[in-house]
Image (cartoon, rainbow, N blue to C red):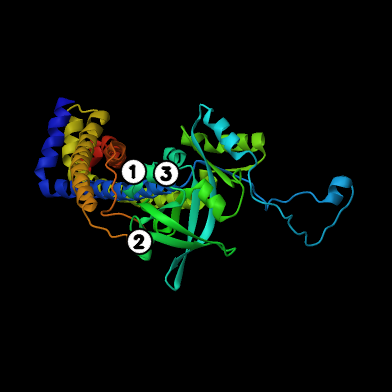
Amino acid sequence: MNLALRIAKTHLLAKPRQTIVAMLGVTFGIAMFITMVSLMTGLNDFTEELTMTSTPDIRMYNDVTEPRKSILEEQKPRGLVVVHHPKPKNETPKIRNAFQIAEQLRQDPLVLGAAPLLSTQVFYNYGPVQLNGNLAGVDILEEDKLFKLRQKIKTGSLEDLLVSTDGIIMGAGLARKLNMINGDRVVITTPQGYTMTLNVVGTFQMGLGTIDNAKAYANISTVQKILQKDQSYVTDINIKLRDLDLAKHKAAELQRLYGYKAEDWETANATFLTGSIIRNILTYSVSITLLIVAGFGIYNILNMTIHNKMKDIAILKATGFAARDVRNVFLIQSMAIGLMGSVLGLAVGLGLSYLVSLVPFNGGDIVTMDTLPVNFHLKYYLIGLIFGNATTAFAGYLPSRAAGKADPIEIIRGQ
């Protein structure tokens, strides 16, 4: 093996330009793999974090649109009943005993928090202009357990909302559009025509324009007053679990237990998850293709090297080298090129990823992001190193195997 290493080293150094070209092919493939995977997974993690910041793990609500049996079907369950254009019942989306259900859920060891919610569409009056938005009535401290609102507060505090009967914490984008600051008063109007003046006690910024430009928080009692509902009127219960992966199973369990619709975060964000999976598939496909192309380059170079070294192979085999020994000489060359190219590619990929992470990005009113998000997880570097070396090893094995099978007599005759 020591002699095989020395011969492989001699071959590599004999034609340094050829060796460097092969190594740079692997370097380029690994560097692009690291850069693309780091950027795409960083974007996916960033958007997932923003989505989960504003989405509960499980949302429980009374789905009034679900089909229900008609009176005829209840009277004649086995009969043939045809009802044309059935109209929905005049049913409110209220969850009965919502506060008691939320308290029961908080006792569950799998549940991190459960927050009742009463939400309504409103118009924010800005002089002669009305801006469409959403007003969420919450228990602000319970909401903080679910979405870490305290970290998102830009001005004011959560406690300012607790001590105010007509307070409102407004999204930063919405406050900017309305030219509002803490202490200002804003007039809101419901679709039913009810008007109320609220006091701005703070602003928050989630990082998503769809939320920051339209949403505001108030106490549940305030929104109940706006909607002219009783103190038990609640339409949703948002639930946060200690283990996100249990959401689908837990949602089905809660739906059977309480009889209300329980929608897990995967179902609610199915479109986003599908897009994330497709982006990952495309990223890995392109990156792996680059590594395979680099492998073909090594294959071609070793084929040319073996063709040029046929006389040396004949001499080696004539002096007692077995087919395995000859194969090892060229396989070592392939592995050396792959290892040097992979290590250099990891370094170049790390440098490119760092430069990409410094690129300024202005998300405007859509998303709050100063620079492009990039992942520097160790696992991607390990994947690149392992796959890069595996590709070059396989690319070098085929020509080295052919070199080991070469007949020295036929080589000498052909010279």
Nearer to us in this view, 275 or 6: 275
- Can you tell which mark lies on residue 180? 2
Q: Nearer the viewer, mark 3 or mark 2?
A: 3
Q: Compared with residue 188, is residue 16 higher up or lower down, i.e. above or below?
A: above
For disc 2, the neighbor class at 10 Å (few under 14, some 14 to 19, many from 20) is some
Q: Nearer the viewer, residue 315 or 106?
A: 106
Distance between the Cα atoms at labels 3 and 2? 20 Å
Q: Which residue is mark 3?
A: 163
Instruction: Give the CA separation, mark 1 to mark 2.
Output: 21 Å
Q: Between marks 1 and 3, how big is the CA–CA gap?
A: 20 Å
Query: Upstream in the sequence, badge 1 or badge 2?
Result: 1
Left or right of residue 189: residue 396: left
Observer able to see residue 44 = yes
Question: Which residue bears the numbered disc 1?
Answer: 151
Q: Residue at x 56, y 52 (%)?
A: 225
- Give the residue type that dot 2 points to: Met
